[in-house]
């Protein structure tokens, strides 16, 4: 069974989702929690059987789909993807169990289970077309979640979300077809297998174009400045569960894809575009932080802060060294936990008051002390307080980029301080002072169902903040092999020097060759 | 005194005619049955047509076996040309017809199906299309084209509504014009080369190195007009939306598939040697036409208020998309054309059948046309199963993986990439994004809006019978599980196209 565990993790929720249609309406919640629980248990099992010391792919599965055109069903995980898969199943479980009163709850739960299938699929796929299938398919459940359960502008927001990402990924698809064609030219066989693409060394000019095509697809998904405009709408209109999954998992698809595709396939182009992308990332960090400060709606604050932190992830990724990339992967998980938790927290207060405007609140700490405590913890984690989960990732990402450019790193570091300002300001407005609004006077504190979702997140936040090693070690191992691959593949001298080699032997032979002359 | 012409029957290879003769025999039989006993029920004629179509498909598959073993087959004074293209196209034509004809068994009674002539005409039409694809003789192509078209005009008018008459007359006048174009173009080429066979024309033209370029261009323009009319390339598309609107939904779905594949075959046979021989002007004209057809049809589809008209424009856009394969003209692109059209047949016939199944006999006050978007509002609440199936077809048309049309799309775009048409590949990809909007619009109505007052969901299945459900079931299975059958189909198509020399 362990040979096919990835397939089981991917398709179990889909099959369960189809059967879920037959479950009676009042019992469907329990069914959803049970299925998501099994799914989470399966993904934990994946973690326990995962060998942290191996840097390559594990649990590989291969099945020909369209061999005539090189499309195969290839799955596998390494240290980069395994934790995001676990995070996805974790959030599906938490999301379903935290669902409050929802209309058409059966459709919602079935949709969430399908979404879980696509999320697991994206991170486990090792064939570009298979990846693309899950990548696109993940749009459909999200479209439905935003469009059917969202706020007043839900249709606009959902269609915008769909079209934006769909357009970007079609350009990416053309890039993938080019990549397969180049592989065909080099070897005489069609192949979309990512691991086989890794072996292909492309001339720099091709790399630049292909990088741009892939970049468009990924950057819209992340979303990077200036393609971020769909996200505030999507978050603003989405129901709590939609925002949670969107922020915690779906956005990670873009940053993950950068590490899986762009960096190892186009090392020279990555170096070429490193500074432009870093500048975009820093604009994204600072600009969205400032926009977040100006928001009146607490959900928008969280949404913009989430975009802002995605900028740090991009910055870490394009540090192109082990510290930066490991940090950015760790930060993906950290950001998933923290922003997911913050959206859940916003949902808690929205369920009670049906408003998200901060001016409506004030002094909530007196009324809802437990709520205020958890919110405070998550907020501190979000601004990157040491000993919380975000700090580890942000620190490593910046450390990595510091080796490429001191000034840009300094700017990015400054931006994190801005992050602290708006978060603390928002917290102050909502929780401190006197209770000014009578409607808030008798609000009930977080209940058991909400605690069930929030407590595990709080524990993870602190635990991984203090002791990140269980995650960081396997991540590090896999990242090392990626960086080494990039170094070996790089053609230009600039790229060779920017991407460090991890094998000492190669350096020695390199330096010894000139000496021999 | 003339010497008696001595031709051995063997050299005629009459077996090449078998697939076309079967539907003709079927049509005659239906007419005879009607004459001998009137007022028989339509189920009889539907089943007879099904049987003959099944025989026809068998004959086509038989010739596919012969082709796989012995290569291209010529017959009847070399007028008939049974090559891979002809066989693949006939499989699509007959297969789609097999899926279409059970749609006549509706719950409500519609005018056209009460005439046995409908079924006779339908079978005549199919044999016309089969002749059209199985020849490279311009005269036989013309005869096939006209047989099929005249039958089709009548079938449309038989729907017996004001709009149907309008559609039939419009189609007829425009069709007559395109027939004129076709014969004029053929005449020019005959004058130039002394032959009406495309391979002869090609041989003579390349032997004299396209000396009379001016005349070649004149002939090509007329042929482009004639074929462009059939596949509804812009600017020859103006008939399409009105004709689709006037026909029944099932017929509209049929028209978006079968006549077009026949025209594509003629286009492949006729244009590819011209493009490859360096008639640069034709390449530019086709390029422009393809891009404009894709893009403009998409724009028009965006602003439609009626689902059927939207699907009509979307069919035009898909036709433009596939015409790109003719422009690219490699083995891969021609294979992609067939793959795309097979998958498109399932998806588009499925979505038009979903409209057909919801067709009301009498429109309520507030509903200006048969299939307004409003009619589908909140469908997920009132009849969830139908909404999911309809949503599935829309997603497939939009090219969302893993549904059928996505695979056709990537293979076609990939063939553009391989042949060096990078810009075209990007335009095709971006057009899919534009198209996604109007397919999503229907999904938004079905899944995210509240139902119109007084709509209890009965309307969506008002026409439902077992046979319609079976057809929709087949179409949706084909749409969802296309990926499983993709590899054998692709290998089959590629070997047939390759062995025909395209």
Image (cartoon, coloured by chain):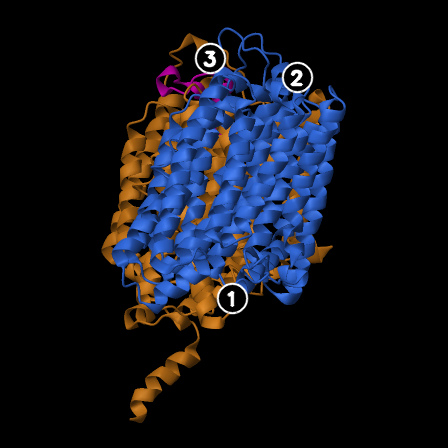
Chain colours: A orange, B blue
Is the same chain shared between marks 2 and 3? yes
Residue A362 pos. (x, y %): 38, 18
Looking at the image, which residue is at 56% across and 31% down?
A: B351
B380, above or below B56, in the image: above
Q: Chain of mark 3?
A: B
Image mark 2: chain: B
Furthest toward the left, the residue is: A407
Q: CA distance from mark 1 to mark 3?
A: 57 Å
Can residue A133 be seen here? The reply is no
Q: Which residues are magenta?
A: A343-365
Badge 3 marks a residue whose secondary structure is loop
Side (left or right) of A245 relative to A21: left
Res A360 seen here: yes
The image position of residue B139, as x and y in percent, is 47, 49
Q: Quadrant of residue A35?
A: top right
Within 10 Å of disc 1 (Cα), the crowding (few <14, some 14-19, many 20+) is few
Q: Which tag, 2 or 3, sits closer to the chain's start?
A: 2
- A124 or B24, which lies in front? B24
Q: Quadrant of residue B273?
A: bottom left
Front residue of A6/A512: it is A6
- Residue A362 part of the magenta segment: yes
Q: Nearer the viewer, residue B16 or B233?
A: B16
Instruction: Read off the residue under disc 3.
Output: B368
Residue topped by disc 2: B109
Find residue A196 and name its label.
1
Structural distance between the alpha carbons of marks 2 and 1: 59 Å
Callout 3: 10 Å neighbours few (<14), some, many (20+)?
few
Give the label, 1 or 3, closer to the camera. Answer: 3
Kindly identify the residue that appears in the image at 61 percent across and 56 percent down: B487
Q: Position of residue A33 (x, y in %)?
A: 67, 32
Front disc: 2 or 3: 2
């Amino acid at each position: 069974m362990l040979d096919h565990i990835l397939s089981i993790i991917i398709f179990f929720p889909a099959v369960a989702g189809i059967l879920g249609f037959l479950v009676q309406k009042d019992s469907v919640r329990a069914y959803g929690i049970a299925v998501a629980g099994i799914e989470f248990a399966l993904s934990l099992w994946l973690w326990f059987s995962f060998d942290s010391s191996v840097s390559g792919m594990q649990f590989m599965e291969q099945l020909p789909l369209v061999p005539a055109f090189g499309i195969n069903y290839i799955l596998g995980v390494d240290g980069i993807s395994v934790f995001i898969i676990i995070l996805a199943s974790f959030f599906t479980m938490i999301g379903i169990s935290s669902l409050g009163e929802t209309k058409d709850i059966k459709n919602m739960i079935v949709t969430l289970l399908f979404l879980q299938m696509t999320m697991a699929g994206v991170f486990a796929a090792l064939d570009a077309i298979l990846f693309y299938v899950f990548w696109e398919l993940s749009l459909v459940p999200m479209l439905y979640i935003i469009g059917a359960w969202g706020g007043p502008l839900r249709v606009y927001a959902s269609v915008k979300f769909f079209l934006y990402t769909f357009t970007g990924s079609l350009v990416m698809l053309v890039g993938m077809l080019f990549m397969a064609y180049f592989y065909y030219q080099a070897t005489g066989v069609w192949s979309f297998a990512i691991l086989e693409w890794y072996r292909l060394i492309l001339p720099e000019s091709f790399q630049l174009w292909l990088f741009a095509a892939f970049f468009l697809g990924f950057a819209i998904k992340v979303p990077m400045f200036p393609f971020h405009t769909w996200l505030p709408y999507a978050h603003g209109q989405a129901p709590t569960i939609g925002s949670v999954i969107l922020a915690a998992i779906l956005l990670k698809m873009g940053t993950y894809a950068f590490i899986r595709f762009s960096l190892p396939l186009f090392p020279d182009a990555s170096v070429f575009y490193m500074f432009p992308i870093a500048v975009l990332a820093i604009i994204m960090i600072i600009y969205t932080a400032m926009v977040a400060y100006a928001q009146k709606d607490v959900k928008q604050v969280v949404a913009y802060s989430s975009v802002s932190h995605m900028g740090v992830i991009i910055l870490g990724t394009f540090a192109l060294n082990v510290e930066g990339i490991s940090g950015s992967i760790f930060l993906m998980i950290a950001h998933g936990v923290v922003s997911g938790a913050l959206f859940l927290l916003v949902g808690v207060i929205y369920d009670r008051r049906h408003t998200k405007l901060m001016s409506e609140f004030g002094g909530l700490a007196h009324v809802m002390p437990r709520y205020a405590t958890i919110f405070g913890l998550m907020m501190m984690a979000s601004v990157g307080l040491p000993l919380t989960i975000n700090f580890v990732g942000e620190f490593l990402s910046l450390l990595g980029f510091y080796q490429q450019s001191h000034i840009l790193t300094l700017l990015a570091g400054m931006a994190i301080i801005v992050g602290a300002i708006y978060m603390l300001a928002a917290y102050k407005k909502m929780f401190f002072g006197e209770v000014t609004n009578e409607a808030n006077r008798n609000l009930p504190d977080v209940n058991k169902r909400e605690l069930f979702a929030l407590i595990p997140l709080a524990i993870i936040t602190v635990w991984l903040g203090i002791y990140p090693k269980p995650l960081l070690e396997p991540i590090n191992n896999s990242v090392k092999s990626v960086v080494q691959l990039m170094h070996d593949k790089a053609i230009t001298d600039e790229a060779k020097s920017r991407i460090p080699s991890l094998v000492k032997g190669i350096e020695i032979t390199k330096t010894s060759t000139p000496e021999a002359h | 005194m003339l010497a008696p012409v001595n031709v051995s029957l063997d050299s005629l290879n009459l077996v090449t005619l078998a697939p076309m003769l079967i539907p003709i025999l079927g049509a005659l039989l239906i007419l005879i049955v009607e004459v001998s006993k009137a007022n028989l029920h339509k189920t009889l004629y539907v089943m007879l047509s099904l049987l003959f179509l099944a025989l026809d498909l068998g004959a086509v598959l038989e010739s596919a076996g012969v082709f796989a073993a012995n290569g291209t087959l010529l017959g009847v004074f070399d007028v008939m040309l049974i090559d891979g293209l002809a066989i693949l196209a006939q499989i699509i034509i007959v297969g789609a017809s097999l899926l279409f004809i059970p749609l006549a068994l509706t719950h409500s009674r519609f005018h056209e199906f009460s005439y046995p002539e409908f079924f006779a005409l339908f079978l005549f039409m199919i044999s016309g299309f089969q002749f059209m694809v199985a020849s490279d003789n311009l005269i036989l192509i013309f005869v096939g084209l006209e047989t099929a078209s005249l039958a089709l005009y009548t079938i449309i008018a038989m729907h017996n509504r004001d709009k149907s008459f309008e559609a039939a007359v419009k189609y007829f006048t425009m069709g007559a014009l395109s027939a004129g174009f076709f014969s004029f173009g053929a005449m020019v080429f005959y004058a130039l080369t002394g032959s009406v066979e495309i391979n002869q024309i090609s041989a003579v033209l390349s032997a004299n190195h396209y000396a009379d370029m001016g005349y070649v261009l004149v002939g090509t323009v007329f042929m482009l007009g004639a074929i462009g009319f059939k596949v509804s390339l812009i600017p020859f598309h103006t008939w399409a939306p009105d004709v689709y609107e006037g026909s029944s939904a099932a017929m509209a779905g049929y028209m978006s598939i079968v006549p077009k594949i026949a025209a594509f075959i003629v286009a492949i046979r006729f244009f590819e040697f011209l493009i490859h021989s360096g008639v640069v002007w034709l390449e530019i004209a086709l390029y422009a036409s393809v891009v404009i057809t894709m893009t403009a049809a998409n724009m028009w589809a965006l602003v439609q208020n009626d689902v059927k008209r939207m699907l009509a424009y979307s069919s035009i856009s898909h036709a433009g998309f596939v015409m790109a394969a003719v422009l690219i003209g490699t083995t891969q692109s021609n294979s992609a054309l067939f793959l795309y059209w097979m998958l498109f047949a399932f998806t588009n016939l499925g979505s038009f059948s979903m409209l057909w199944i919801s067709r009301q006999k009498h429109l309520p006050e507030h509903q200006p046309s048969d299939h307004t978007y409003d009619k589908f509002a909140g469908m997920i609440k009132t009849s969830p199963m139908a909404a999911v199936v309809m949503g599935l077809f829309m997603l497939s048309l939009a090219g969302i993986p893993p549904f059928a049309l996505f695979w056709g799309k990537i293979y076609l775009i990939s063939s553009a990439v391989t042949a060096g048409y990078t810009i075209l590949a990007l335009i095709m990809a971006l057009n899919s994004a534009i198209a996604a909007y109007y397919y999503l619009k229907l999904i938004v109505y079905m899944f995210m809006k509240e139902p119109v007052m007084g709509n209890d969901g009965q309307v969506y299945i008002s026409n439902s019978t077992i046979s319609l459900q079976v057809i929709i079931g087949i179409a949706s299975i084909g749409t969802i599980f296309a990926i499983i059958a993709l590899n054998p189909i692709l290998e089959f198509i590629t070997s047939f196209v390759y062995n025909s020399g395209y």
